Image (cartoon, coloured by chain):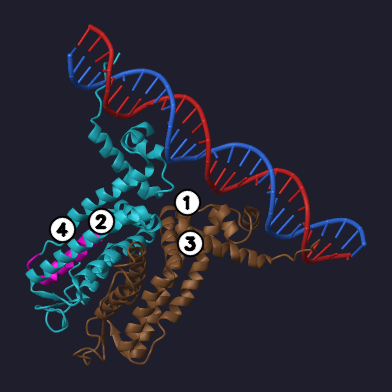
Chain colours: A cyan, B brown, C blue, D red
Amino acid sequence: MTGPVPRVPRDEVRRRLIDAAASVFAERGYAGARLDDIAHAAGFTKGAVYSNFPSKHALLAELIEQQARAQLALGNIEVRAQNRPEAALDDIAEVWAVGIVEHEAGTRLLIEIAQQAAREPELRELYVGVRRGLRGALATTLQTAADDLGVEIIVPPEQLALTLQALRLGLALEHGTDPDRVDRATLTAVFTATLRGVIRGASDVSRPGTGSAAPRKESE
Amino acid sequence: MTGPVPRVPRDEVRRRLIDAAASVFAERGYAGARLDDIAHAAGFTKGAVYSNFPSKHALLAELIEQQARAQLALGNIEVRAQNRPEAALDDIAEVWAVGIVEHEAGTRLLIEIAQQAAREPELRELYVGVRRGLRGALATTLQTAADDLGVEIIVPPEQLALTLQALRLGLALEHGTDPDRVDRATLTAVFTATLRGVIRGASDVSRPGTGSAAPRKESE
DNA sequence: AGTATTGGATACTGACCAGTATCGTGTCGG
DNA sequence: CCGACACGATACTGGTCAGTATCCAATACT
């Protein structure tokens, strides 16, 4: 009846499988994820998985690098500086908070990967390399942004980068379990307060009370 | 030959099993943990597990409450105030940092539990209750400590408590994967800087007199 | 002491699932 | 148009493991 059904290009099969894996790993955890589920979520069967990856493990490894690239791109966008330091600071906090709330699955995957990497030395090596790279990039970006804005970061940029990375993971965990209390506004507040605490700037920072008292810019 | 071997008291069997479960869950993750391993780590067999707990799930639930009590006790100790504010601050940071480095397994378990709770609604309810309790207790402790020391916390105590809880989890993840870069000194520095950023006190700040002019009312 | 009961050990079962072997169809070179 | 190959589908295997059924020794009770 129906003529030959054209085949999906190999690259796309791969891509779909990886995407599906990301989602299922995030949902069920690495150990709990079934290869069958991943395959079907991608619209294929397990055969496709083993035709594209040597093992479940390899799929996870692939995912780490994939995630790295995505996060890296995101990180660079996230800290695009604005003009006024105050606004820029709120803006950064906002973006990070939104990232947690709106990419729950992605962040959960990140945590799952971290846990997995803490266990398996082989994955750890890969993960740590990626993670350090991201941290370094973030540190540079932060420093650059601070210079542009004419403010001073009173801790080493690497340390601030680590703080933010850790906060993101930790807050994602808290938000993941208690989204009511740990909502977007709260997340923003935490990031804002944390950033404000380590920055000393030209405009306002040490003395908000005198001038523009509490510039609570609670968008939304 | 050998006469009757005295039995281990039931309570102790339970306790040993729970301890073993904590360690194995932390090591291998919930899904990856084998009940047989837990039993043998405790010096028993699976029969003992099912004699004391209805299911693997129940064992995890038990662990959450157990962990809650332990953390609660720890939290209270952790913020025992010193005399000089500066020293107290460093002291708190130190204790939290050491907690991460020296209780790796415990903290990893905490993260595992959080992930699990994010997935299973039933566990979530239990976990969130516990977690909120701990947060509240920590907030109170912090506020009290601040009052005792005569310093002011410039964010809502609940928010600071959340920040510290999140930082602990996040930093534990980073330390778990990259203990070389994220070492004890670094952890201490992060906590110190974060705390310092949200505190305005008699000792270290230019203007103690003005007091709590701008009360930051926060979500909640 | 003798009997009942408690509680952990042992042995088993059934489900589940990563990985493999094989098959069938679409694609491509000649 | 016709083989050869690519690649995903299907079917199967072996091992693992939560949960169960049964057993047996140690305590509790009278």
Residues under labels 2 and 1: Cα distance? 26 Å
Tags 1 and 4 in contact by the CB under 8 Å rule? no
Read off the magenta span: A82-99
Q: CA distance from mark 2 to mark 4?
A: 15 Å
Q: Disc 3 marks which residue?
A: B126
Percent of width and height locating residue B184: 34, 74
Q: Is residue A126 magenta?
A: no
Residue at numbered disc 1: B31
Please identify the dominant SS of the magenta region: helix
Characterize the local packing of mark 2: few (<14), some (14-19) or many (20 or more) Cα atoms within 10 angstroms. some
Tell me the kind of residue under disc 4: Asn
- The location of residue B160, given as percent across then percent down, is 32, 75
Q: Residue at x 39, y 71 (%)?
A: B101
Dots 2, 4 in contact, CB < 8 A = no
Q: Residues within 10 Å of mark 4 (few under 14, many from 20)?
A: some
Residue B137 in view: yes
State the quadrant of the C terminus of chain A.
Answer: bottom left
Q: Amino acid at mark 2?
A: Val
Are dots 2 and 1 in contact, CB under 8 Å? Answer: no
Q: Which residue is mark 2?
A: A130
Q: Please name the amino acid that badge 1 sits on.
A: Ala
Q: Which residue is mark 4?
A: A76
| Left or right of B7, for residue C23 | left
Mark 2 or mark 3, which is nearer to you?
2
Query: How far apart, in angstroms, are the residues tagged by discs 1 and 4?
Result: 36 Å
Write down the chain letter for disc 2: A
Of discs 2 and 1, which sits in the foreground?
A: 2
Q: Secondary structure at mark 1?
A: loop
Say whether residue A84 is magenta: yes
Asked if residue B63 is positioned above or below residue A70 in the image, the reply reads below
